[in-house]
Amino acid sequence: MSTVAVTDATFDAEVKNSDIPVVVDFWAEWCGPCKQIGPALEELATEYAGKVKIAKVDVDSNPNAAAAMGVRGIPALFIFKDGQVVSNRAGAAPKAALQNWIDSSI
């Protein structure tokens, strides 16, 4: 399973109403650190398939979801469980650090 592209229109259905935890990555095409963590998130999406959904929200195309979450800088990562934010972090990190963060939050 790969990451799921989420829009302002699909945010509630894909993230808040998900029956499994969701990691949401707020990113943009022009963001260097966002591109840095992209491959790690793709790998994690495969490794966590069926247990955790990895969603990506392009902040340029979908400003409302980012604004609703108070995103001021990217990459901004949030973990939702049962429709609520249980953890968040900002900035790029190596795959192992992202994996540890996810494991400790779900």
Image (cartoon, rainbow, N blue to C red):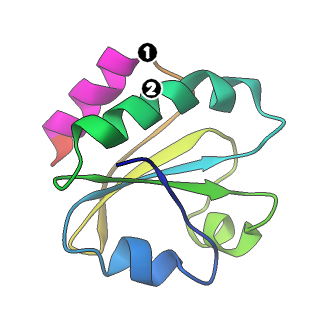
Q: Nearer the viewer, residue 43 or 65?
A: 43
Q: Residues within 10 Å of mark 2 (few under 14, many from 20)?
A: some
Left or right? Give the position of 45 relative to 70: left
Q: CA distance from mark 1 to mark 2?
A: 7 Å
* Residue at (73% x, 68% y) in the render: 62
Q: Amino acid at mark 2?
A: Ala
User: Residue 30, how many percent across, how many down?
Assistant: 84, 36
User: Residue 46, how many percent across, how many down?
Assistant: 31, 39
Residue at label 2?
Answer: 40
Which numbered marker is on residue 94?
A: 1
Q: What's the magenta region? A: 94-104
Above or below residue 27? Residue 55 is: below
Question: Are the residues flagged by discs 1 and 2 in contact, CB closer than 8 Å?
Answer: yes
Residue 103 is one of the magenta-drawn residues: yes
* Residue at (42% x, 51% y) in the render: 78
Q: Nearer the viewer, residue 100 or 40?
A: 40
Q: Amino acid at mark 1?
A: Pro
Above or below residue 47? Residue 81 is: below
Q: Secondary structure at mark 2?
A: helix
